Image: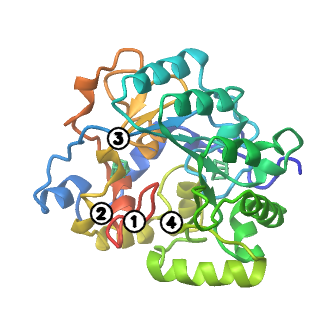
Amino acid sequence: MSAINFHPSLQHRSHPLASPVAQRHLLAELPLARSFEDAVASTGHAPLRSQTPTVLQMNVGKRCNQVCRHCHVDAGPDRREVMTPEVIAACLRLLATGAIGVVDITGGAPELHPQFREIVREARALGCHVIDRCNLTITQLPDYQDLPEFLAEHEVEVVASLPAYSLKQTEAQRGNGVFDASITALRQLNALGYGQPESGLVLNLVTNPVGAFLPPNQRSLEATWKREMMRRHGIVFNHLYTITNMPISRFLEFLLESGNLEAYMEKLVNAFNPAAIAGLMCRYTLSVGWDGRLYDCDFNQMLEMALPQTIFEVTLADLGDRPIQVAAHCFGCTAGAGSSCGGATAA
Ligand code: SF4
Ligand code: SF4
């Protein structure tokens, strides 16, 4: 399977929204009923501060074999940003302190990074739990067909994105050819033990709405997905995560061009759920960019809302109880049942 030519990156099209500054300005100028800071203050949590991080999320670059319509990274085959060996070494030094036990590797398609397997091996040797945010289709490319075996051998948790259990909705968001390749990949993972009871190999699926609406209830959707994935495709998995589409990057472009931006933001603001604050991923995550800059989360990373320190100089003392940078996009994490890399936070 070759790269899917569906919706080129904003950067490739020299689109104004390729600029994080332009995205931030656009969001800041929207006439919202209240700011995210005010919404958080009404819950008694203001200003939002982090706990000591338990997850190091490494965004190893923006290269991807897909060009999904909703991508918050603006990833694609035309992107060249990849995490440098120096940044990887600094991440591993931080992990070697033993202070952070979970490494969440994301991208782009993280497996395209030439040092992906080295990161996995070394993090596992340090005793870390490793998560691979896999788009599934990567495993069908000629150089990556042994990837499922590698992941199983190193007991890597696979968090795999699949918008829908039907072809039409999946390909509306991710491009032609994605669905069949994803199903093939899931069957291969199942055959290795992933998602099977007692195997210890965890396979979680991530779904996000194909359009400008909030995800349905995660628990009831998971039951439906488990039934339908087995009935239609013979596939088992552990958990379903529902993630709200964030109003940034290519989904922001979609909202703007479809005339849905203000209505979607209003929907997010009106659905603000105070119970989602406690589980916000920024409260326990440290996000590292390809160039070593640090962020509260992957969304802040894409909007270039960086922490003062980089991975080269950060100390453990800097990480706990730090102020979290918030803006209007944060309403995407607190709407309804809440949303994070691990799915709903307040279900
Ligand atoms: S959403 Fe994931 S798979 Fe799709 S283009 Fe972005 S990084 Fe690649
Ligand atoms: S976008 Fe990031 S900083 Fe904002 S609430 Fe969500 S996780 Fe926290």
Tell me where residue 196 appears, x and y as whole percent.
64, 66
Residue 32 is tagged as 2
Q: Residue at (81%, 41%) from the top-left corner?
A: 144
Mark 4 lies on residue: 241
Do callouts 2 and 1 mark residues in contact (Cβ within 8 Å)?
yes
| 96 relative to 120, above or below | above
Q: N-terminal of the two: label 4 or label 2?
A: 2
Mark 3 lies on residue: 54
Report the side of 203 relative to 56 (left or right).
right
Q: Which quadrant is the C terminus positioned in?
A: bottom left
Q: CA distance from mark 3 to mark 2?
A: 33 Å
Do callouts 1 and 3 mark residues in contact (Cβ within 8 Å)?
no
Mark 1 lies on residue: 265
Q: Amino acid at mark 3?
A: Thr
| 220 relative to 34, above or below | below
Viewer-proximal residue among 150 and 144: 150
Tell me where residue 92 appears, x and y as whole percent.
49, 23
Q: N-terminal of the two: label 4 or label 1?
A: 4
| 327 relative to 120, above or below | below
Report the side of 166 relative to 90 (left or right).
right
Q: CA distance from mark 4 to mark 3?
A: 19 Å
Q: CA distance from mark 4 to mark 2?
A: 28 Å
